[in-house]
Structure formats: structure tokens, C-alpha cells
Amino acid sequence: MVPLKRRKVPSSASSDSSPDVACKFPQVVLFLLERKMGSSRRTFLTDLCRKKGFRVNETFSESVTHVISEKNKGDDVRRWLRSQGHDLTIAHLVDIGWLTDSLRAGHPVDILEGHKLHTTDYTQSTHKLTSSGGEVTTRSIPAYACQRRTTLSNRNTIFTDALLLLAENAELSGDDGRGLAFRRGAAVLKALPEAVTDMRRLRGCPCLGEHSLRVIQDILETGVSREVESTKQSERYQAMKVLTGIFGVGLKTADQWFRDGIQNIHQLRHSGRTLNRAQQAGLAHYDDLMQPITKAEADVIANIVEEAVQAELPGSQVTLVGGFRRGNPSGHDVDFLITHPQEGREEGVIAKVVSRLEAQDFLLYQKTTRNSYMKSNDGPARPASSMDHFERCLCIFRLTTGEQHEPKACTQAPGEDSEGRASKRAVRVDLVVSPFSQVAFALLGWTGSKLFERELRRWATREKNMSLSSHALYDNKQGRYLKAATEEEIFAHLSLDYIPPSDRNT
């Protein structure tokens, strides 16, 4: 007689991971939601996770870092857990796809947008901090960088420098998604008002994936990240950083040179490679262009550019944008936005300004491109990418400094001051011309930071069903352009609190 099958009874150690199983990732605590997943599949996945070294809790608690859900909407999961008396604000809410990706990789992977179960209030992430007095306070951290104020006072430089280096390495390897994940994590740390001294302070912080958290924990425990130190010593990272630092050299070109055995400036100069005009200029002035530009030097260039623009088109407005507008004391290039209150008068001015600067021997290299955005009846057509289409000139500027290292206009012979003791250096300068009707959008787009602008566009698309560029803001639902004369009006259209340039240093 065939005996009846006995129903499998869960282990008595059901409240937590079995102590007999080695836990490889103690900082990660999973809770698999049975709703719609079913008890059998939940049991199977729980056993599989534990065999792979993951810690899985049978019951939800504050120690849980990831809630795994299958075939559920984010709002439904949050509502159901709250009905059971659970607080979900301290854990990541992710789809089963994140778990399968992690099991396949053999470790917790970074949480990408496709892994998240978004809810109507997911843009705010709350975490709890324990003060020295033992009291528990709660702070809300917005998930989008464009919702946060980020000044130059970074109290977590040791962590952000590490994450940004990993972001740069990922981007140099062509993995922009991974690089963006690290940059978003670093941006959150930059916005924190205090230095991170305990991993518990980061519980529930948005945009900090498991990889970033491992790097932070490594630094907290040992003072350095082994991964970051290894990356710094990487032959490819060092070579790609040098080669892509050459003006006019992109990622594909640098990668090909590296594959061909070129790893530094000396090897490139003796390689016999045919370089285009921009690359020739970049190689010739490499040392100068790698030196930071001070605000004092930027102001001198601003005076020269202002004088040239006003001479060719009186009444124009010239604004120093980029990092200097955000309050940075130094930068690697100087950007100017040029417009005129009378729409249309700005057309063609860039060629005249460039000719004047060349005649004054200020330009070592220049390349001018015409505006390429398409016009419609009520505004510029939405560009197909985040790149803008303004008329512009990318140039290398000749700046002369005197013996006291005070920048001055190059009115004497190149390389000499009135007493023959001046020196000159090359500086990257961008001149951008915008129609007056688009200047608020251009000013916002060219002020940066790059991540802040990216987050603004992401917010517009995901949260407001709008399309934002440096030319315009288009409401996809209403099917019309939203006009704005100031940056404040753009933020208002997007239902965001206005953030001044000095607080956009993400």
C-alpha cells in the first residue's frame, strides 16, 4: 500500500534565517510577501535564497531591508502591509525581478528603476536616526535630486569621492546605467546635513543600492574601500581617464587607442596617429586644460567676452553659467549664455564675436555650430534627446597672467606683459546663444549640475507627464508648451519648490 504524502512543515526556525546556513550578506534582510506569490513558491524561494547566502525573515520587522513582491502593484503592497500593522518606510519595495537578478549574480545587485515597485508616495523616503541622547528622530529624504537642496558643504566627501570614482570607472567602461546609480547614491550623501558614522543612519535612504552600501560599510570599517583602491590602480582606468581627458577625444576613440596599446600622452604623441583638429588642439594644450580654472580667471574671461558681444550686438545679455553660477570656486571650463531682449537679434552674433576674439588673438581653437532645433507654431519642437540645439562655439581661450598670478586681458604680445614677465595658458570656453523666449530654459539647463538637470527631466517625465529640455517645457497631457520667463516659473510648472543655483551641486 502506497503511503499518503505528508505535508511539508516549515522549519521551527521560521522567524529568521536558519543559523546553520552561512549568511554572506548580513546587511541585507529579505522578506518575501506571500500575497499572490503563494506559500509553496515562497517556501521554495526562501530555501533557495538561504542556500545562496541571503538572510530571509519569515515575518516582517524593522530589520528587513528589502520587501520582495510578485504580481502586485506598489500601492496595493503598501496598503496591505499597513493593514497588518507594518511600517514599510524603512525598507526597499522591489519586484521579484530584483531577487532573481541577485540570485543569478550570486550577490545583492543594485536596485534599478525596473526593480522598484513605485507607489504614490515613493518620492519621499523616511529614515530614522538615533541621536547621542538616545532619542529617535525622523527625517524625510526626497528620492529626486531636484527635490533636495545640495550645497557645496559636503560632509561625506570620503564616501562620495569613492562612489564617484566607481561611477567614472563604470562610464569609462560604457556602463552608463551603473555609473548613474553610483552618482545618484553620492548625491544623496552630499545632501545629508551630517557626516555618516553608522550604517543605521542610511537605512531607508533612497538611491543607495547594495553595491554603494557595501562600499560605504567598507570605508566605515577600514577607512578605505578595497574596490576603490583596486580601481585606482587599474591599468585601464588610469589610461582611459588620461585619454578621455584630451579635448576632442570620446570614449570610443580612447577605448580603441587603449586596445592598440596607447595608455598615456607620451605614447599618443609618438604613435603616429592621425588626429582631427580638435584632438590636435587638445593634445597640444593638454597640461593647461587639465589645470583648474579659478573664479578670478573666469571673471577676466567674462569681461573679455562681454566686451566683444556688446561691440557686435549692443544691449545683449551675457551670463556666466555652469559651475561658477552654482558658486564653485574653480572649474575645468567657463560657460557663457548669450541672448538679446529683442527676439531674433541674436541670430548670427556668434560668428561676429568669434571673429573679433580671433582678431584680438584670444582664441587658440574654435568650432562654431549653428542652431539645429526645429520650430513649430507655438515653440521649438521637442528635441529627440536631452542635448540642446543652440548656436554655440566651443573654443580654447588664450588667457594671460602677470607675474603676481593675477589674470589679465591679453592686450600685449602673446606670452608677455608690459614688462615682459607674463605667461599664458589655455582655457576651455563655451559660448552659447539662446533666443530670448527660451532663455529661462537655457539658463536652467546650462547651470547644472549634470545630475540635477537629469533628475529634473526625469521628474518632468515620470511625475508630471511633461518633456523638459534647455529649449522648452511641453505638457504631453495638454498637448501644449508651457511658457516661462524665469527659472522660478519652470519649477512652478513642475510643482517643485524653487532651488537656487547654489543648492544644485548634486
Image (cartoon, rainbow, N blue to C red):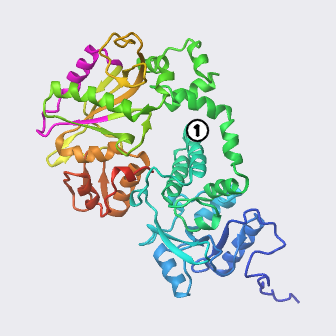
Task: Give the image quarter of residue 346.
Answer: top left
Which kind of residue does numbered mark 1 sit on? Answer: Ser
Q: In the image, which residues are magenta?
A: 336-364
Q: Does the magenta stretch include residue 174?
A: no
Describe residue 215's horizontal placement relative to residue 177 as left or right. right
Give the SS element for disc 1.
Answer: loop
Where is residue 328 shown, x and y percent of the image? 41, 42
Describe residue 270's horizontal placement relative to residue 487 as left or right. right
Task: Give the image quarter of residue 218.
Answer: bottom right
Residue bearing mark 1: 173
Comparing 280 with 32, the one in front is 280
Where is residue 30 shown, x and y percent of the image? 66, 71
Q: Identify the residue at horizontal 32%, vertical 62% (top origin).
A: 496
Number of numbered discs overlaid on the protein picture? 1
Where is residue 178 shown, x and y percent of the image? 56, 49
Residue furthest out toward the left: 342
Q: Identify the residue at horizontal 60%, vertical 71% (top origin).
A: 68
Task: Give the image quarter of residue 435.
Answer: top left
Q: Is residue 338 magenta?
A: yes
Looking at the image, is 73 positioned above or below residue 381?
below
Q: Dot 1, crowdedness within 10 Å: few (<14), some or many (≥20)?
A: some
Residue furthest out toward the right: 1
Q: Is residue 167 visible?
A: yes
Comparing 25 with 401, the one in front is 401
Q: Identify the residue at horizontal 75%, vertical 63% (top origin).
A: 52
